[in-house]
Amino acid sequence: MAEKVILFQDKDFETSYRAEYPDEPGRAEPHEIEHLDELTPYGMLLASLGACTALLLNMYARHHDLEVSGVEIELQYLSEPREHIDLSIQVSGNLSAVDRERLFKVSYHCPIHKMLKNGIEVRPRLAEVPVKSI
């Protein structure tokens, strides 16, 4: 299974999403996503990682007076040879190579990235349903 989400966020934090499903005929080309519920669960995970990363980079750039006009992040979930996410970051704006490298290093501080990298325990439980009186 492979799935790709491409996210663009401008300096004002306006975000758009495109998705493609290379394994599915007719859906292999990137298409605009109007609502995130159009994505599979894998796509939703990719979208959250991309949005968190883009938000972090835009906020960092704003606080450090870096001229970022937009951030495009391409994320792809791949299941072989081992499950992993390929993440490509493109930052547009009037930036030096040093600025771009600094922003790339900042991207590792995204909380979603940290959770995925370090692993997080999930403790499911069934919530009690209140008994309705008749």
Image (cartoon, grey):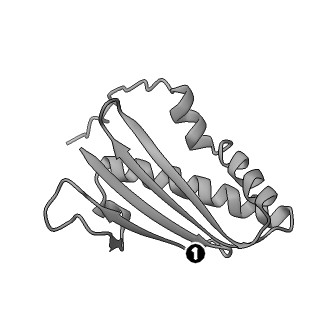
Taking the image as shown, residue 4 lies to the left or right of residue 53, namely: left
User: Which residue: 27% across, 35% down?
Assistant: 131
Q: Could you tell whether 109 is left or right of 7 in the image? A: right
Mark 1 lies on residue: 14
| Residue 62: % across, % down | 79, 67
Q: Does 93 appear above or below 21?
A: below
Q: Nearer the viewer, residue 123 or 1?
A: 1
Q: For the N terminus, which image quadrant?
A: top left
Q: Quadrant location of residue 100?
A: bottom right
Amino acid under disc 1:
Glu
The crowding category of the residue bearing disc 1, from other C-alpha atoms within 10 Å (few below 14, some 14 to 19, many at least 20), is few
Image coordinates of residue 50 in percent, x first then y, are 52, 55
Q: Position of residue 61 (x, y in %)?
A: 78, 63
Front residue of 40 and 101? 101
- Residue 100 lies, with reference to residue 131, above or below; the image says below
Residue 19 picture quarter: bottom left
Residue 115 in the figure: left or right of residue 19: right
Q: Is residue 125 above or below residue 105?
A: above
| Residue depicted at x 44% and y 26% | 122
Q: Secondary structure at mark 1?
A: loop
Residue 90 coordinates in the image, percent (x, y): 59, 63
Residue 21 sits above or below residue 119 on the image:
below
Judging depth in this view, the residue of 44 and 18 nearest the camera is: 18
Image point (19%, 53%), residue name: 23
